[in-house]
Amino acid sequence: MIIRKFSGKKNFVLNVVFLVLIAASLVAALTIAYNFTSRYVYDEFEKKKTEVVDETIRPYNDFFQNKIPEISLYQGYLDPSSALKFSKTVLKQFPFVSRVIFYDTEVSNHKTEYAFRVNNLTIAPKSIAQFYRKQPDDSVLLYNINSGGRPIKYINEFNRVSVKLAAFLQSFELSKSTLSDESLGTFYNVTNNRVTFMNIPREEEIKAFKQLMDDNLKKSPVYQQDVLSFLLDPAKLRIKNIHPHFYQKIAIIPLTADIIDIEPEQVSTEFPLTGAFSSYKLHFTSSSDFLSDEILRRFFPLAVAILMVYGVILTIGFLIYRNLNINNKLFKLQYDFVNNLTHEFKTPVSVIKIAGNNIRRATQLTDRERLHYGKILDEEADKLNDLMNKLLSFTQIENQAIKVKRENINLEVFVQNMVDTYNIKYKDFQMEYTIRNVEHFYTDPVLLGSLFQNLMDNAYKYSLPGKKELVIDIAHEKTDIVFRFSDKGIGIPKDEMKNIFKKFYRIQSEYNQQGSVGLGLAFCKELVNFMEGDIAVRSRLGQGSEFTITLPYNYAG
């Protein structure tokens, strides 16, 4: 009796423990599943915004890539009347285009008022017209060369496109048979809320323009070109919320706008727009209750699946318990059975615990997290790759494995290309340059480009917001050519000046959080030495720095 009573109590305790474990593991599984679903929803809230941005910006991409190039079909022979027809289709098809400015352009070597002139080349507007929705008839023509007038208000944008065309012509080689894809960007000028496009000239016209610029010819024929400038209104972009179950509200706001009136129970995220709208961003907001509803909607089928699994487990437990009662008459069998049953209990409980741990670990190894980690690994791989390349360059320089491949460089074109590249990369980077007493420099463009890239990167990274400015001064002084890079950055302490050109040395300060490994300036130093030049720096803490590179002047005219 005592043994039976002890055995019964033991069975009762085991049953209670089993039920407690089942209940605890069920709660744990449901909690883990809910947390997993919650994290998934919030991850999707962050990730799906890119798809919304892509859909929202798709009309702009269609406008930029497909509609604007149609101008080239007219081969430069648009007039205000035909430009009006083209503009009406644009204004109707793309609501975010608020106004179109048309420049009926002439290219020749004639001297013309309000013309952009380089050497012997003249690029001048013959007439300027504007088109917009619901405009009166008398507001179409803004300027006509025959009736006079002052197009000062509209000439700046025209000049910007003319500058790009002139720079392209200066570097264009008459021996080229076709235009490269890279050169097509010459005929676009994309700024904040504006896209200006010049009709792409035919190959024979480009060669004629090149000759007009370089040769002092007699009065030339007049070539016709079309320039259209499209003024864009980001507020008229149609936001396409293709994931309404994640985002309650989506708004277009300036990139620099700070949202200070978000309620505590709201969740928000942002994503910058591209192209002419790069100074704006999409702002996504949803209330916590809204996302909680989405979490519950996604959690419900998972919870049902978990409950069904545990229902099967409880059913199995009940059947085992009933079998124990049937065989309770035989003590030995009961004892052995209880021992075996205890072992069998531990096995499924262990499996459940392992499964729970796997689920818990799986919340850190989702596809989206792998993508996120993959992005981090990719960015770090890029940094390591950059570090390896610089280390390799150090080794090659020290072993004299690099050979200088000198070319005759047009400094104006070279510097402008560098500035254009960084203007695209960093919209808030203000750069100016001057070139004095020199036009060409006979050196290796790759090595010179590396020096520019490192110093321009440093000027941007180590300048505070609002002070990201760089002035480049190039001058021919005696037997040298001197490059000066002046910024308004955080400056360099005096006691650190002697160390900044050392390998792997980084100034320890609150501002030095740019992910640098201390190779940029050391690489510049080694490179300048290799080019038989010198590099020096002047700096005032909090006011900026000026790096001066002096190289032997070589010119092969």
Image (tube, grey):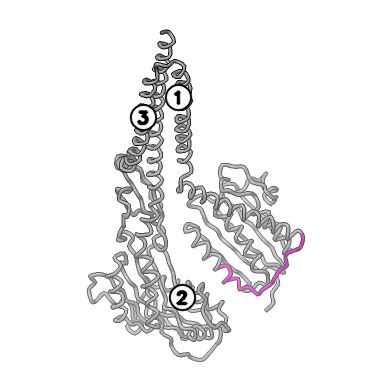
Camera-side residue: 458 or 494?
A: 458
> Is 536 a magenta residue?
no
Query: Residue 162, which numbered label?
Result: 2
- Camera-near label (3 vs 2) is 3
| Residue under the point 59% across and 42% down | 509
**Label 2: few (<14), some (14–19) or many (≥20) C-alpha neighbours in 10 Å:** many
Q: Which residues are magenta?
A: 399-415
Camera-side residue: 67 or 364?
A: 364
Q: Is residue 19 visible?
A: no
Residue under label 3, please give it.
314
| Residue under the point 59% across and 68% down | 435
72 is higher (above) or lower (below) than 373: below
Question: CA gap, disc 1 to disc 2?
Answer: 89 Å
x and y, in percent, of residue 519 in the image: 66, 52
Most distant residue in the bottom direction: 218
Residue under label 1, please give it.
341
- Camera-near label (1 vs 3) is 1
| Residue under the point 66% across and 55% down | 388
332 is higher (above) or lower (below) than 150: above
Please, what is the three-letter code of the amino acid marked with disc 1? Answer: Leu
x and y, in percent, of residue 156 in the image: 42, 70
130 is higher (above) or lower (below) than 38: below
| Residue under the point 30% across and 60% down | 238
Please, what is the three-letter code of the amino acid marked with disc 3? Answer: Leu
**The N terminus - image quarter:** top left
Regarding mark 1 in the picture, which secondary structure is present there? helix
Please, what is the three-letter code of the amino acid marked with disc 2? Answer: Ser
527 is higher (above) or lower (below) than 159: above
Q: Are marks 3 and 2 in contact (CB under 8 Å)?
A: no
Q: Is residue 430 left or right of residue 88?
A: right
